[in-house]
Image (spheres, helix red, strand yellow):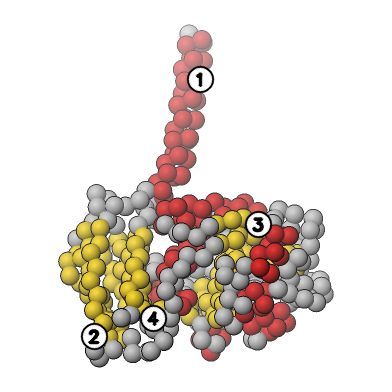
Amino acid sequence: MERRSLEFHKKGFIAVVLLILLGELSLTVQPLFVASNQVTLTSEFGTGGTLKVTYDFKQGSYPNTIRVAVFPTFDALFDRDIFVYCDQDYPSSLVSLSGWLGIIDHLEENQRLKGYRGKLETVNALRLRDVMLQRNDSVVIIPSGVLPETVHTKESSLVRQFMENGGIMIWVGDVFAYYSGKPRGQLQPSSSENPGLEAQEEILGFVLSNTTELNLATEKTMVSNGLSLKYTGLQAGIYVDEVLRHDGLVLGKTSGNMTSLATVPVGNGFLVVFGGKVSPARSELGEDFVASDIMTILLSGIIYSNGQFAYNVIDRTDVHSQSLILDVTDERIRGAVFLAVSDDYYSYYFYRQFIPRP
């Protein structure tokens, strides 16, 4: 009897372990589901300076809530090479090491599923310096909240030069450019060697972000809603008025004068800033949301837009001959981007098309 009881408990334990593993597998696999939807698109540039985009949308076997957006752009779509900084010998802030690595894992996943055509490469602190000196045609992602001293110190920095010459920098974590990290050392927040807010003045000409309390943005903007951008952090808050004053775009949600996500032009390049803390996947400030938002922003080309934006929401039904209309009287506009993005967490759908101006 004892032996049978022992065998029973052993089998029961194995069954529980298998259920846990299957649950973990389910959580891992579910976000990888790719929805098979179809979209038919027609567009017409009118003589009065308008663009009318008409679309038919056919849902696949797994109906999604889809955000359909169109916006003008001053440049054609181009998937730049992406260099993601990651060096475990250097410190991070408001981003744990697991979150840092998690962002990179989810970036690779999003690149594959959303069809980003540029190369994605992880670089250490030394290689980052080479990239920022030689690859002004690329995207550099700093997902650690701290720049390494190889590219940024109180005395000198490559950050402004990189963006002025055409580079795109995407910043995640603590206050933009505030810290300079040393190898094999702990971050010293109060150290006089940190570049501090003066670094923003030198790089941007103004202070874009500063430390606030841990908080979440709750008010949706047209862009955050239309592109289904999820990140809501405000701990390294980004000032809405400074973004708008310097010809930038508020991309994320807002709370008062703070936004969770924004972009500003810097010379011939751009800075994209996330508003602070990163938490584990499947949470409000999740590393998966950060990676997904980064790839959507890059694929959409929204940073080249003038802020005009039109969108609709398709709620799990087939949609026939709906239209979006834009004002394209600005002679600098080279065309428009049509984008369809799944709003559902457990599936991916992403479609984009550049509509060139005749």
Residue hosting label 4: 334
Q: CA distance from mark 4 to mark 2?
A: 15 Å
Secondary element at tag 3:
strand
Residue hosting label 3: 123
State yes or no: discs 4 and 2 in contact (Cβ < 8 Å): no
Q: Residue at x 32, y 73 (%)?
A: 355
State yes or no: discs 2 and 1 in contact (Cβ < 8 Å): no
Q: CA distance from mark 2 to mark 3?
A: 47 Å
Q: CA distance from mark 4 to mark 1?
A: 67 Å
State yes or no: discs 3 and 1 in contact (Cβ < 8 Å): no
Among all residues in the image, which is located at the extreme left? 320
**Pointer 2 or 3: first along the chain:** 2
Q: Residue at x 28, y 68 (%)?
A: 313
Q: CA distance from mark 3 to mark 1?
A: 47 Å
Secondary element at tag 4:
loop
Which label lies toward us, 3 or 4? 4
| Image quarter in which the C terminus is found | bottom left
Residue hosting label 2: 46
Which mark is drawn over residue 10?
1
**Pointer 2 or 1: first along the chain:** 1
